Image (spheres, rainbow, N blue to C red):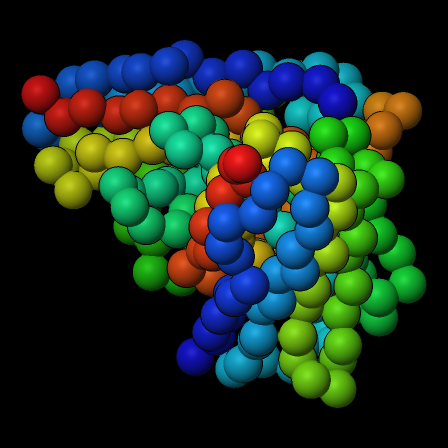
């Protein structure tokens, strides 16, 4: 199965904005919705964004998602210390071995 | 409130077998696809397998195909993962995760707390 590539880390000061990219291919991001997950240290992942840009109830609008072609982006505005976590994109892949896949993960650090 | 409770993890020797369970509550279990996702120590998330609500369709990651089997018992609201021929690189925390909508959307809106599987001699 293919790989979804994310930057290993991004950082910014409180109140600032960060963006996290997720690069795939036509058989995954290019053909299927993307979701994004936040994983705080020592906890299970939490759904932040589904179907490219929709937020589940309870997720603040500081979190946003977008997609263009075979790449997706998560944006976090008004950065808070509580946002310090690992973030993963995820999607389905319909190549020869159909299945799910996650991105390589990005550590967000609040300076 | 949706709850997912995994169990069955532990220490197993290479080549051994283990069966994980995930008991679900707070939703109509048979409606939703369920997945297993694992995370090796200090590593990222890896999708393992998915099964549709009826149990009629399953998919597996290449890394576990032929060794792991996902099943479900909708009468017991329980998801299973039978793991055979275990290897060191199967060592991970295993999460069960509920899909947001049927059939398979790959949007996991609920996760269990995870169960640790350690493969070592």
Q: Nearer the viewer, residue A104 or A66?
A: A104
B52 left or right, relative to B96: right
Where's residue A2, x and y in %?
Answer: 71, 18
Expressed as whole percent of the image width and height from the top left, the position of residue A74 reads 42, 29
Residue B68 seen from this side: yes
**Quarter of the figure that contains the N terminus of chain B:** bottom left
- Point out residue A23 in the picture as x, y percentages from the top left corner: 57, 15
B4 is higher (above) or lower (below) than A15: below
Q: Residue furthest bottom?
A: B75
Is B110 above or below relative to B39? below
> At 90% from the left edge and 24% from the top edge, which residue is drawn?
A96
Residue A46 appears anywhere in the view: no
Res. B66 image quadrant: top right
A71 is higher (above) or lower (below) than A37: above
Q: Is residue A14 left or right of residue A8?
A: left
* Residue at image location 27% in from the left, 35% down from the top: A85
- Residue B95, horizontal then vertical, whole percent: 52, 53
Q: How many marks?
A: 0
The residue that appears at 39% across and 51% down in the rendered structure is: A44
Q: Nearer the viewer, residue B95 or B117?
A: B117
Residue at left 16%, top 42%? A82
């Amino acid at each position: 199965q293919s790989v979804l590539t994310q930057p290993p880390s991004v950082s910014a000061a409180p109140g600032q904005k960060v963006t996290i990219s997720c690069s795939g291919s036509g058989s995954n991001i290019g053909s299927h919705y993307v979701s994004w997950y936040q994983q705080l240290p020592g906890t299970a992942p939490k759904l932040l964004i589904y179907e490219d840009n929709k937020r589940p109830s309870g997720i603040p609008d500081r979190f946003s998602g977008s997609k263009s072609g075979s790449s997706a982006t998560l944006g976090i505005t008004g950065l808070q210390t509580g946002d310090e976590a690992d973030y993963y994109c995820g999607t389905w892949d319909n190549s020869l071995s159909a299945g799910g896949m996650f991105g390589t993960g990005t550590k967000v650090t609040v300076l | 409130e949706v709850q997912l409770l995994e169990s069955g993890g532990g220490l197993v020797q290479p080549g051994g077998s283990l069966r994980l369970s995930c008991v679900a509550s707070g939703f109509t279990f048979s409606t939703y696809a369920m997945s297993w996702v694992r995370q090796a120590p200090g590593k990222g998330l890896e999708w393992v397998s998915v099964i549709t609500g009826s149990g009629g369709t399953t998919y597996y990651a290449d890394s576990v195909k032929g060794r792991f089997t996902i099943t479900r018992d909708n009468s017991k609201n329980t998801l299973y993962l039978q793991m055979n021929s275990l290897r060191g690189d199967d060592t991970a925390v295993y999460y069960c995760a509920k899909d947001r909508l049927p059939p398979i959307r790959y949007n996991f809106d609920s996760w269990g707390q995870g169960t640790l599987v350690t493969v070592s001699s």
